[in-house]
Image (spheres, helix red, strand yellow):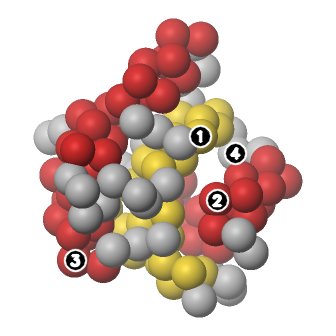
Amino acid sequence: MKTVLIVEDIELNRELLAQLLEDDHRLVFAEDGVAALERAAETRPDMILMDLSLPRMDGWEATRRLKADPAMAGIPVIVLSARAMNDDEERARASGCDDFLTKPIDETLLFQTLARHLGN
């Protein structure tokens, strides 16, 4: 079973993602970018779903730091963001994210993206 780290500060969004993914994935949660780095180092997830607007450290900075760490650089980071401006996706990709999905979450697109990056 693949491990997915969900980095999301809004409880309702965490619960929604948990309902969608808990049957087929081991889930780990972080509520901000600082906790995301800690959880990633502890659990070495197979994928990270990263919100961008987070307290303490935003998703852009957390992604940059993850991708700068050779031990975690290979973990796919998929941005899940309500920020849907063109430059937000460009900025996220420049930070090292591997894919970009917008909220509200399109379940079909989410599962396609998971399959593409997890190979399942």
Front-lying residue, 79 or 30: 79
Task: Find residue 99 and name its label.
Answer: 1
Q: Quadrant of the N terminus?
A: bottom right
| Mark nearer the N terminus (2 vs 4) | 4
Estimate the x, y position of residue 65 in percent, counting from the top left. 21, 43
Q: Amino acid at mark 1?
A: Asp
Q: Which residue is mark 2?
A: 117
| Mark nearer the N terminus (4 vs 1) | 1
Asked if the residues shown at circle 1 and circle 3 are in contact, with their CB atoms under 8 angstroms apart, the answer is: no
Q: CA distance from mark 1 to mark 3?
A: 23 Å
The residue at the far right in this view is 108
Estimate how packed mark 2 is, as few (under 14), some (14 to 19) or many (20 or more) residues with alpha carbons within 10 Å. Answer: some
Is residue 84 at least partly visible in the picture?
yes
Estimate the x, y position of residue 43 in percent, counting from the top left. 30, 78
Up-down relation of residue 43 to residue 119 (above or below): below
What kind of element bears circle 2?
A: helix
What kind of element bears circle 1?
A: strand
Q: Which residue is mark 4?
A: 105
Q: CA distance from mark 4 to mark 1?
A: 14 Å
Q: Amino acid at mark 2?
A: His
Q: Amino acid at mark 4?
A: Ile
| Mark nearer the N terminus (1 vs 3) | 3
Q: Amino acid at mark 3?
A: Glu
Asked if the residues shown at circle 2 and circle 1 are in contact, with their CB atoms under 8 angstroms apart, the answer is: yes
Asked if the residues shown at circle 4 and circle 1 are in contact, with their CB atoms under 8 angstroms apart, the answer is: no
Q: Which residue is mark 3?
A: 42
Asked if the residues shown at circle 3 and circle 4 are in contact, with their CB atoms under 8 angstroms apart, the answer is: no
Q: CA distance from mark 2 to mark 3?
A: 21 Å
Up-down relation of residue 28 to residue 85 (above or below): below
Q: CA distance from mark 2 to mark 4?
A: 17 Å
User: Which dot, 2 or 3, sits closer to the camera?
Assistant: 2
